[in-house]
Amino acid sequence: MAAEVLARGGASVAVYDAMPSAGRKFLMAGRGGLNLTHSEPLADFLTRYREAMPNLRAAVEAFPPDALRDWSAGLGQLTFVGSSGRVFPKTFKASPLLRAWLRRLNASGVKFAFRHRWSGCDKQGRLQFQTPDGPLAVAASATVLALGGASWPRLGSDGGWVDILQAKGVAVSKLRPANSGFTVAWSDVFRDRFEGQPLKGVALTIGAHAVRGEAMITRSGIEGGAIYALSAELREAVLSIGQATLMIALRPDLDTTALTTRLSGTRGKQSLANFLRKAAQVSPVGIGLMQEAAIASGRSLAALSPAELAQLINAIPVQLTGAAPIERAISTAGGIVFDELDENFMLRSLPGVFAAGEMLDWEAPTGGYLLQASFATGAAAGRGVLGWLKKS
């Protein structure tokens, strides 16, 4: 995006990419349907960036979701708003958009060099690259670093830039997994039966933070959209005290009194599982979670009263023992501290060097917020370079 803004502004632009082709993580983001952005009001949208909102506000306001949708339409990829408010190309795919984008960039004179991995700068300030043909030094009037975080390193963003910039005195907050799953010590019985099963329409809570949505049981723990929305709070709890207690409400639209009434009827010859399924519409995986919690507390689920069952249905404690590895996270928290950047995304200690995207110290939930901020900061860095070149 920085290259497009620069080329449109009349600059001569070269993009150096460590991978054999462009946009590999962009393609991964679109593997299950490319969620470009979100349609919610901009004021609400900006809050998704949490404590980084003041640092991202100007960039996102200058290139907001509607502008991103117009940009996509300009490449022949019309978008639509899904039932969740998320915005997708009508094709749902990333590849047609990326191909059209690369054609436009090529037509505007942007040059691409692949299998060029940046390794720092030499004493003359030239960019150094490791290439299949050996080391290469490139003199540039200005540079935009868009090197990603450290999730999915096989796609190119392995966090190797952290040591390079820290050696130059640039403060970098430690890279941590964001929008990741978490590990849980499930019993063998639960793991073998419910691995891959979804929890639909649940409410998840940690402390004062709560979300509704879906989650997925994995062999080693739990993941999914609702988990990702709480991943920052869950991750910080795990990092600070070694674990986090996630509360799961299976029937959040029914209070304890209503559930108790439903569960006070005669069970007859029904198994407890069938009774819970019919009387309270609790799914088999939900019943399994209840059994896990009862066993952990040293009690039998069958020994609980209707009131205790009702309370448990909407307050199942699940102990998270760790976060999934950063290599498997959707995105990354941490990065270049915003105090290191001026209002144009230029590094204060490295004049002429700008930074954008996920390598900056921000995080956001899935839902279009990640791509939106990456596009917006790329555009902002491009504008910053144009201003810098005019002054130079």
Image: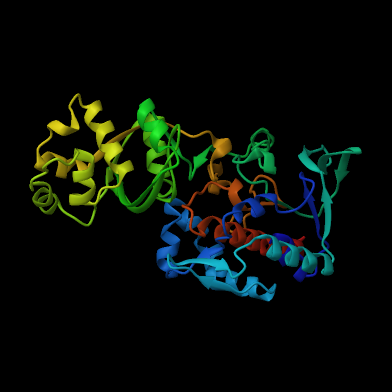
Q: Residue furthest top?
A: 298
Q: Quadrant of the N terminus?
A: bottom right
Image spot of residue 120 (x, y percent):
76, 38
Of the pair 211 and 18, the residue shown nearer to us: 211
| Point 76% across, 62% down: residue | 389
Of the pair 206 and 340, the residue shown nearer to us: 206
| Point 76% across, 45% down: residue | 19
Image spot of residue 352 (x, y percent):
73, 52
**Relative to 269, 209 lies left or right:** right
Image spot of residue 268 (x, y percent):
11, 42
Q: With respect to residue 260, does 10 lie above or below?
A: below
Residue 205 visible somewhere in the drawing: yes
Q: Quadrant of the C terminus?
A: bottom right
| Point 65% across, 63% down: residue | 379
Q: Residue furthest right?
A: 133
Image spot of residue 184 (x, y percent):
39, 31
| Point 69% across, 46% down: residue | 350
**Relative to 230, 343 lies left or right:** right
**Relative to 330, 227 lies left or right:** left
Q: With respect to residue 366, does 133 lie above or below?
A: above
Residue 346 visible somewhere in the drawing: no
Colour convention of the picture: rainbow
